[in-house]
Image (spheres, grey):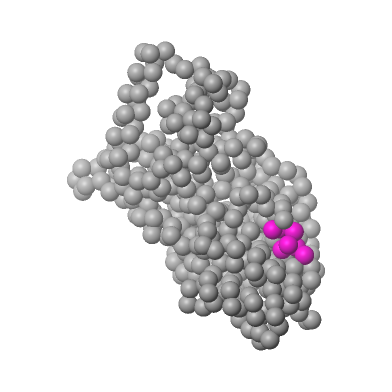
Amino acid sequence: MSRREAAEFLVKKAIEYRDPVHCVTRTIATWEDGTTACPSPPYQRLLHKITGRTVTQLGFTPPTPRTARRTREGEDDMRRRTMLLGTGAALLTAASPARGNAAALDGDHLQQLQNAERTIYAQDRNHGSAELGRQAAAALNTAYAWLRQGRYTEPLGRRLHSATGNLSVAAGWLALDSGRTHDARSLYTEALANARQADDPGLEAHAFACLSLLAHSTGRPREAVTTAQVAQRLVATLGSPRWLSLLSMREARGWALQGDRALTEQAIVHAHTLYAQGPHDADPEWLGFYVPAELAGLESLCRADLGQHERASAGAEQAVMLFADGHLRNRALYTADVALHHARKPNPDLDAAGDAAHRTLAYLPDVRSERFLRSLRDIAGTLQPHHSTRAVADYLDAYRALVPAA
């Protein structure tokens, strides 16, 4: 694994074990480079569960008894604080400070907000958004209660607004994925407000990028283009070609929805050129989903919008093949796209569509995204006129047996 992949893997496993940790690329680097002599107890527990080895067997130097005692005492303090704040197993669920008794906020509160955002993306990437919405809303309410009623310094306040805005973006994505577009717009607008209060151009760009995606979903292609362009202007000074590549692809989708082939091609080529510059330190953590498979998949959506269903099906198939073991939800969605593209060709390839449709059903019940269920219903509706074909009839029977309210 790369350091980023290792960090993502550890965060995912920690969530599964109900013992969340804050692990990023830099954490792995300090272990490998020897900067950290021995991980803290939460990481020790996690590494032992995964590898079955002690920290000594893994090459670390355990602390002396006195240091270990101080570490345990600090861990106990942190655990008590975590229990009091009510972080639970996954997301932030803390009760807000009582009126007239404002709590002093510190870096622990900030880290909890950041961990909640990471948890949302990790869970959504693997399983979809169906069961995360309420947790995200509760976490966001707590974040605003902290901002409204807590005591904090001005620099910490800006960081708390940034973290709350990023959490709002994550919650907005869950709303959009579930088809709650009005909620998504409200949450993205809240993120913009937090970005201004935090003086955070990266957060502001992320919110505009999400508004572009929302515009794709709600039939406003001109808005999709303009919001993507605003985001590109904000990101231009941040040093992240990969981020600019994603935004160029968002712009391409807007042009494709308007039927402008020339500008769509121009934006797609620009997106690939930027992507080829590779990852940079300035890439935001949430951008980890934008792997080569996702680039291919997003281009396939543009091709479909232009009516180029042959190229769209090939691109979606390429996306499915390029995805690694992670990104289960997106693999499921692009597999569904393969079926739809084959079915919507001028001369439908019903065997290929039926095969891809069957592969799509295999992602149930692990993927619990409402958008995925909508895709399954779209496949069934598109194939229904061809129900006399054996491959289609077999799929429709399996679909009715597996999909709720089919």
Q: Is residue 301 left or right of residue 25?
A: right
Is residue 243 among what the camera can see?
Answer: no
Query: Which residue lies at the image location 51% right of the left edge and 44% below the top edge?
Result: 12
Residue 373: x and y in percent read 54, 70
Q: Is residue 251 above or below residue 275?
A: below
Q: Is residue 316 magenta?
A: yes
Q: Residue at x 40, y 49 (%)?
A: 91
Q: Nearer the viewer, residue 289 or 265?
A: 289
Is residue 203 visible to the viewer in this orientation of the structure?
Answer: yes
Number of labels in the image equals 0
Residue 310 screen position, x and y as percent = 79, 71
Front one among 157 and 349: 349
Extreme-left residue of the structure: 100
Q: Is residue 367 left or right of residue 341?
A: left
Q: Quadrant of residue 9?
A: top right
- Identified at 41% across, 43% down, the residue is 18
Task: Note whether 159 is above or below 297 in the view shown.
Answer: above
Residue nearest the observer in this picture, 353 or 234? 353
271 vs 372, nearest the viewer: 372
| Magenta run includes residue 47 | no
Q: Main secondary structure of the magenta part?
A: helix
Q: Quadrant of residue 395?
A: bottom right
Q: From which residue to which does the magenta span run? A: 314-320
User: Residue 36, how many percent across, how many down?
Assistant: 53, 22
> Which residue appears at 69% of the width and 73% of the height?
354
Q: Quadrant of the N terminus?
A: top right
Residue 367, relative to residue 68: is it above or below?
below
Residue 136 position within the rendered picture, expressed as x and y whole percent measured from the top left? 41, 55
On screen, residue 198 versus residue 244, left or right, reads: left
